[in-house]
Each structure stands twice: as structure tokens, then as C-alpha cells.
Image: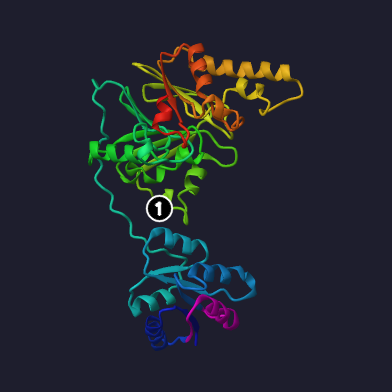
Amino acid sequence: MKTVVLIDDDASFRKLMGKWLTVAGWNVLEAGDGEDGIQLALAHQPAAVICDLLMARCNGFQVCRSIREQGANIQQPRIIVTSGSGYATDQQSAMEVGADEYLIKPFKGDDLIRILERQSARQISIAAAPVPPHKAPASLPADQPPRLKFWGVRGSIPTPGPSTVQYGGNTSCVEVRADGEIIILDAGSGIRRLGLALAKEFKDQPVELTLLITHTHWDHIQGFPFFVPAYNPQNKLRILGYEGARKGLYSTLTHQMESPYFPVSLQHVPANIDVTELKEFEFHVGKVRVQATFVNHPGVCAGYRLFTSAGSIAYLPDNEPFQRMRSHPGGQQTSDRLEALNYASDQDQKIIEFLKDADVLIIDSQYDDAEYQSHVGWGHGCVEDVVALALFAKVKQLFLFHHDPDHDDNQISK
């Protein structure tokens, strides 16, 4: 007679399952929590373990891990996790830590017995979503004028509240519409409201979007999991950016949506998403030519310049001018100060050349001069340097961006 360990803190349901299993010819050992269940499994080495997911003292994930970690020390049982939760992430997490099956409560005795006796490999019971009929993607009207809209202008962390209503408290996100393309610059918390607006505008019409990520610090990607168009299987979303210092772009976006941080993994987001790590500094988004450059900010951080039929837009949301940083006593120092300053001047000149004659410049201006003195080397600029940079580059229109979370509307307006 085969033995099964039945672990569930719901005594009545555990008793009901015990009856089903006994009638089916199983020797049933019961436990009211995960810790006792693990001890029974180690002592009796059953053919199967049936374990509830959410229990006090020791949950089902821990039970699966503990048993699988025994490896060759015990005969590995078939593990069936049961739960009232049908969330795909819970099912996937259970399988990843060692479950063979996942059964959603309530279920019938026949279902349980059939799964116990099945000899096939691990299975996860997620119903396939119906595939909607294909529609041609929406296209922007040919005569629609180019548009630049700010959905998030704050740096570091969202700062909602009455003191930030004029300029907004959402983190970095800018929408550019030009030459038939919708291009999104960064996916800070502002992208949530952009997504709602796009869903309202295009309704059930598919849409193709391009998202350019400058870098993967939280304030530039934290809004992506809440971007509504990503959950429409008819939409196409291309995400472009450069590989980070420790992980690739896809890996970083994936990890922030893994359990236990978020209930829907990137793999389960239904839109047609293509994540591409850029290798070159020049590429095209449709008819829009894009140039990129690396800027002075911790990690791998890019700035972009979009060349549209209506003019060029430069976007450098995080950048600390080299000369100010290297000339400050608290900045990054080298043994040869003159050489360091010459190098800093050359690096800033490269940025000026990158920005030269831009029609629009959106650039990091997180600090004022006094604040910068205690934030040297943090990777952000101050207003005075940004204005000088724009003047040297002969930029036509300057937008101060990436405002410090401690700056209210009155301070920004000054």
C-alpha cells in the first residue's frame, strides 16, 4: 500500500481528503502544519505529499524546498500543492521550488486521485488565454503635428501631494509623437498615466509603441509593470536600451516583476514585447533617426537624441557635468589635477557636441548650486551648469528635468 502525507491546516478539508485517499487504497498520514508534515515525510518517505500552500509556521513553498533539498537522502515523493489561489505567479513559484502538480481548491476526490496516479512530468494548470482576432495596428494621422508631452518629471522617487501638483510628482516618462511613431522615453511612474491615456485613445485598436530606456535605476523603470498597453495581446511594444553594469536589460525588467515583488511576471504579460539590447549609438525607430551617448551617471546610463521631421529632441535625464564634479574638492580626484580637469573638459565638450543645435533639450537639473555642494559625485547636475551647457550647445529650447523629490512647486518655479 502506497503512503501519502497529507498536510493542511484546515482540519475539515484535510479529513475529507483523507477519506478520498483511504477509499482509493492509500495509507494516509496527516499533519496540521508544514513543519510536522516535513518530519513525517522524512521519517516515512511516502510516495506522495499533498500540501496546502498557505499555512502558519511553514508554508507550502517551504515544504517543497525542504523536501527537494534532501536530494538523494530520501526517496523523492510526488508533491501536489493545493491552494485556493489560482494566480499564475503562485503556480509558477510552486513549480520552481519543487512541486509536481498544482491543484486549485475546491476540487473533487476524483481529480485528486487522478493526479496522484498520473505518471507524467510536472504540470501546471493554467488555462490558455483565447487569441483575439488580428487587427491592423493603429497609425497616427499623417497630418498630426509632432507632440512632446511630459508624464513624469521627478527624480529618484515619486512625490505625490499638494506641493507638487503644478509640475507633478511622477518619475521620468516623456512621450514623443512624430513621423507616425509613438516613442516613450523611460518608464518611471509617469508611464502609468500615459498607458491609461493610450488605452482610452485607441480603445480596442492595436497600437505599436517604442520604449527607450536610458538606464534601469528604479525611477526610470518602476512604472512599467503598471503600463496598461502591455496587457493587451494585440499591442506591440519594442523596448530598447543598453546592457547594465551587472545584468542585461531583459533580466532587470524581468526581475522587478518576479514574485514576491509583483503578481504578474514579464513572461505572462500578454502584449507582443520585444526587448532589444542596443550595441550601436545610432539606430532608427521608423523614420525617426536616433543617436545615443553614454553620460556621467552611476552604472550604464544613456542619453538619446531623436531627429524628427519637425526638429531634434535631446533627452539626458541623469547627467553630472564632469568639470564641476572634478573641480570640486569632494569630487573624483586623480593624482594629476590639471590632467583630470583637461579630461573633464573634453568629456563635457563631447556632450555639448552631442547636443549642438538641438531644438529641444530635456536634461537633469536636480540640484541648485548650494545643494550640489553636498551631492558631488551622485550623478546629477545643477541648474547653473545645465543652463551653461545649453548655451554652449546653442539649444533652442531648454526643459529642466528630473527635479529633486524635496523640491516643491514654488522652489522649481524660482
Where is 70 relative to 289, above or below?
below
With respect to residue 385, does 378 lie above or below?
Answer: below
Residue 137, compared with residue 148, is above or below; it is below
* Number of residue marks: 1
Position of 44 with respect to 157 (left or right) is right
Q: Name the residue under label 1.
A: 264
Kindly identify the residue that appears in the image at 47 percent across and 68 percent down: 100
Residue at x 53% of width, y 75% of height: 77
Magenta stretch containing residue 33, yes or no? yes
Residue drawn at x 38%, y 64% is: 125
Q: In which quarter of the image is residue 370?
A: top right
Residue 372 percent location from the top left of the image: 57, 28
- Range of magenta residues: 28-47
Left or right for 361, reference 385: left
Residue 287, x across and y down, in percent: 36, 21
Front-lying residue, 144 or 57: 57
Most extreme residue toward the right is 335
Can residue 288 be seen at all in this image of the molecule?
Answer: yes
Q: Dot 1 lies on which element?
A: loop
Name the image quarter holding residue 381. top right
Q: Depth check: 66 or 156 in front?
A: 156
Residue 315: tell me if it is visible: no
**Label 1 amino acid?**
Val
| Quadrant of image for the C terminus | top left
**In magenta stretch: residue 234:** no
Q: How far from the left and from the top, in percent, is residue 76?
A: 56, 73
Residue 176, image x and y in percent? 35, 27
